[in-house]
Image (cartoon, helix red, strand yellow):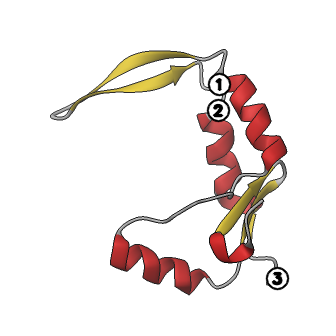
Amino acid sequence: MGKAADRFFTIGKTGTNIVGNPQLAADSFASKRALLCRASIDPDLLDQLATAASAVQFVSNPVEKLGHRWIEQPSRVGQPLSLLSIGPFCTSGSSP
């Protein structure tokens, strides 16, 4: 996995952790409107997600006034990533 300086967060099988100072991520996003997420996903989890993604079918999903987007059907990768990156699983590495 990359150096902590290369990451603002890590996503593992048990949840997401904030790495370092969240203000640096906020400042970077404010100035560049994007974040580099190099090596943020645990390699074992990434392998599992890649295996799951290889069996996913994608379908067109209309988006009003924009066109359409391709979504996985059924969701085998997107929903687990969403769950791991939000809510009670997300910690800053320190006790409240």
Q: Nearer the viewer, mark 1 or mark 2?
A: 1
| Label 3 Cα crowd, 10 Å radius (few <14 / some 14-19 / many 20+) | few
Q: Which label was assigned to residue 64?
A: none
Q: Earlier in the sequence, mark 3 or mark 1?
A: 1
> Residue 94 — which label?
3
Q: Position of residue 45 (x, y in %)?
A: 79, 42
Residue 50 placement (x, y as % from top left): 70, 30
Task: Check if mark 3's residue and mark 1's residue have beta carbons within 8 Å.
Answer: no
- Which secondary structure lies at badge 1? helix
Q: Residues within 10 Å of mark 2 (few under 14, many from 20)?
A: some
Q: Residue at x 61, y 46 (%)?
A: 82
Q: Residue at x 35, y 68 (%)?
A: 33
Task: Say which residue appears at 58% left-offset and 60% top-offset.
Answer: 37
Which residue is tagged 1? 53
Query: In this rendering, is residue 79 above or below 84?
Result: above
Specify the amino acid type for callout 2: Val
Question: Where on the picture, by quarter, is residue 20?
Answer: bottom right
* Position of residue 11 in the picture relative to residue 59 (left or right): right
- Callout 1 touching callout 2 (CB < 8 Å): yes
Image quadrant containing the N terminus: bottom right
Tell me the distance, in whole angstroms, between the alpha carbons under discs 1 and 2: 6 Å
Residue 14: % across, % down = 84, 52
Horizontally, is 6 left or right of 29 in the view?
A: right
Left/right of residue 31 with respect to residue 58 in the rendered view: left
The residue identified by callout 2 is 77
Kindly state the secondary structure of the residue where label 2 is placed: loop
- Dividing the picture into quadrants, the one containing residue 93 is bottom right
